[in-house]
Amino acid sequence: MLKLTDVTVRFGAFQALNNINIEVEEGELVVLLGANGAGKSTIFNAISGLSKPTVGDIRFLGESVKGNSPDRMVKVGVVQCPEGKKLFPDMTVQQNLMMGGFVHRGKKTQLKNSLEEVYELFGILRDKKDDSAGSLSGGQQQMLAIGRALMSKPKLIMLDEPSIGLAPLIVEQMFSIIQKINQSGTTVLLAEQNANAALKIADRGYVIENGAVVLKGSSAELFNNDAIRKAYIGA
Ligand code: ADP
Ligand code: MG
């Protein structure tokens, strides 16, 4: 479904990504593991069109999408739920969701269907639909950010560190929701530092260090890898 070939991204003289090769099959849940500054968000930004690779190619459903604008990427079915949520805090929950549904412009029924699906998945967002986004708890804001991304009915959703800053109980809830999104047919690419929780729900993973893939494998392989256990699982 998605294939990155030798993707390289530079910021001035700094090479943030160095020949990244990543593949995601339709229906999979794939995790990118890596510490702060490893390059996970830069990979997402390259896919979603927010940053331009200097070298390499990105293909989605058999077509090159390198250099596409972010809104073009949403139209072809790729949406990013950014790190730090980037909500509109003074707008209501429902207004934030509507922003994510911009691809349905002029198609009222589709917009309503999307909204209904998001409310089915996140009942709390329906209960709080008229509250300002800024008044929600951290976990609820993350749910809103994911819900907003789902409004465009993506084929592939990229979730950038959805568990960051959340209480352990909420983290567990968040990962089970992500699994549910995947099981309902949406392909998921997840960036996480919480290797333990992420590998429980992922099919496969890549380990990113200093802008390069240093290891890849099934979740079981990564979970049982000694270096991974030391660096990310603490066991
Ligand atoms: P991660 O998401 O894994 O924490 P990032 O992709 O955000 O890592 O960052 C990878 C590296 O690229 C870091 O060293 C970061 O400082 C650098 N970087 C990210 N975005 C920019 C930018 N816009 N300009 C310059 N350097 C950047
Ligand atoms: Mg990041």
Image (cartoon, rainbow, N blue to C red):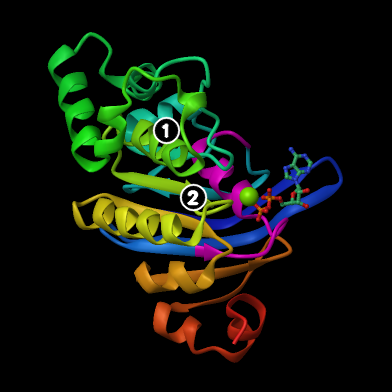
The secondary element bearing badge 1 is classed as helix
**At 40% across and 84% down in the image, what residue appears?**
220
Q: Residue furthest top?
A: 106
Q: What residue did someone put label 1 on? A: 73
| Residue for point 67% across, 64% down | 35
Identity, as a three-letter code, of the amino acid under mark 1: Met
Instruction: Please give left or right for residue 91 compared with residue 192 in the image.
Output: left
* Disc number placed over residue 195 in the picture, else none: none
Whether 231 is drawn above or below 161: the answer is: below
Left or right of 138 on screen, residue 25:
left
- What residue does disc 2 label? 162
Amino acid residing under circle 2: Pro
- Residue 235 lies, with reference to residue 183, above or below; the image says below
Between circles 2 and 1, the one closer to the viewer is 2
Percent across and percent down for residue 116 are 17, 29
Q: Is disc 1's CB within 8 Å of ligand 1?
A: no
**In the depicted view, which residue is nearer to us: 117 or 46?**
117
- Read off the magenta span: 32-51
Q: Residues within 10 Å of mark 1 (few under 14, many from 20)?
A: many
Label whose residue precedes the other's in the sequence (2 or 1): 1
Gap between marks 2 and 1, in whole Å?
Answer: 21 Å
